[in-house]
Amino acid sequence: MSARIEPISGRYVHLEIEGRPYRIYFEEAGSGIPLLCLHTAGAHSSQYRHLMCDDAVTDRFRVIAFDLPWHGKSNPPVGWEGEEYKLTSQFYVAAIAAFSQAMELERPVVMGCSMGGRVVVRLAQEQGASLRGVIGLEGSDSPSPWYDNSWLESPEFLRGDFCAALVSGLVAPQSPDEFRWETLWHYYQGGPEVFKGDMHFYRTDSDYARESSTIDTGHCPVYLMTGEYDYSCTPEDTLRTAERIPGAEAIIMAGMGHFPMSENPAAFRDYILPVLAKIADKD
């Protein structure tokens, strides 16, 4: 079997978020319209590797995905050993803005999944004029509890296998085993209490329902794409959010779970390519 080199390149960028220095890892492939991809809670940018290897995407889009601080190959800040990681809405938005500015991204499309799918609602509301559009995968504008809050204080959250087990049911039964286990491996790799820290944002600091109706989809198109098997962000959650955002388009993906881009990349491709084409054709 001959060697095959993927078209993805990975680098580090040093930047400041809220006045504090960070070393951020990112991967990219392709050229054209910037497509900035945000990973799920407790995971990292590898979730988008299949998208970066698809010529139908990268021929028109520069696909970029970065690891948030504390995640993947991005470092936590100096002094992290003396503090608790807890992701807030304010920090999340600041991190996305700092990375976009450092990379000089001009009117990017922002696509996020899960907690990334939630934060794009706020981005569209606050920064819509500077974006080509947002795509919320498994996204809604408000929290929807899907497990017992008391688990957040369990010492089990220190373990990657516990975090993987917690999200394993969010993968659709139709997803190929190869990609199911690839998706769960991202959670096995998470640092201690990073998934727990992300849940602070996802469960208690990301309610945008009052503001979402003010989004101008004429300037910033909003696409919300959710798998029918997702019980963290249910299809009903997504449809209700789309109803509150005038002009938003909701797409319920058959046979898909909470991690469409990594758990079933071939099926996800059939859903995402038409959306990307709409955005590109409007440019």
Image: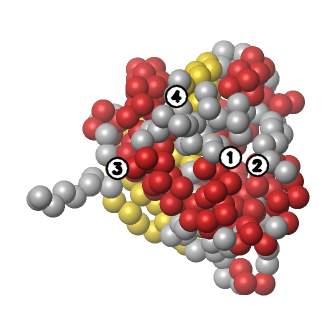
Disc 3 crowd rating (10 Å Cα; few below 14, some 14-19, many 20+) is many
Give the spatial CA distance, label 3 vs label 4. 28 Å
Give the spatial CA distance, label 4 vs label 1. 21 Å
Disc 2 crowd rating (10 Å Cα; few below 14, some 14-19, many 20+) is many
Label 3: element kind: strand
Quadrant assignment for the N terminus:
bottom left
Q: Earlier in the sequence, mark 2 or mark 4?
A: 2
Q: What residue type is labelled 4?
A: Gly
Q: Is residue 254 left or right of residue 178?
A: right
Label 1: element kind: helix
> Which residue is the site of mark 1?
115
Q: Residue 202 carries which label?
A: 2
**Residue at x 55% of width, y 68% of height:** 189
Residue 155 in the image, given as x and y percentages of width and height: 79, 72
Residue 70 in the image, given as x and y percentages of width and height: 63, 69
Disc 1 crowd rating (10 Å Cα; few below 14, some 14-19, many 20+) is many
Q: Earlier in the sequence, mark 3 or mark 1?
A: 3
**Residue at x 43% of width, y 47% of height:** 177
**Residue at x 72% of width, y 58% of height:** 198
Give the spatial CA distance, label 2 vs label 4. 24 Å
Residue 149 in the image, given as x and y percentages of width and height: 86, 54
Quadrant assignment for the C terminus:
top left
Q: Residue 156 carries which label?
A: none
> Which residue is the site of mark 3?
29
Label 4: element kind: loop
Q: Earlier in the sequence, mark 2 or mark 1?
A: 1
Is label 2 in contact with label 1 (beta carbons under 8 Å)? yes
Decide if residue 144 is in sight here: yes
Residue 191 in the image, given as x and y percentages of width and height: 63, 72
Label 2: element kind: helix
> Which residue is the site of mark 4?
255
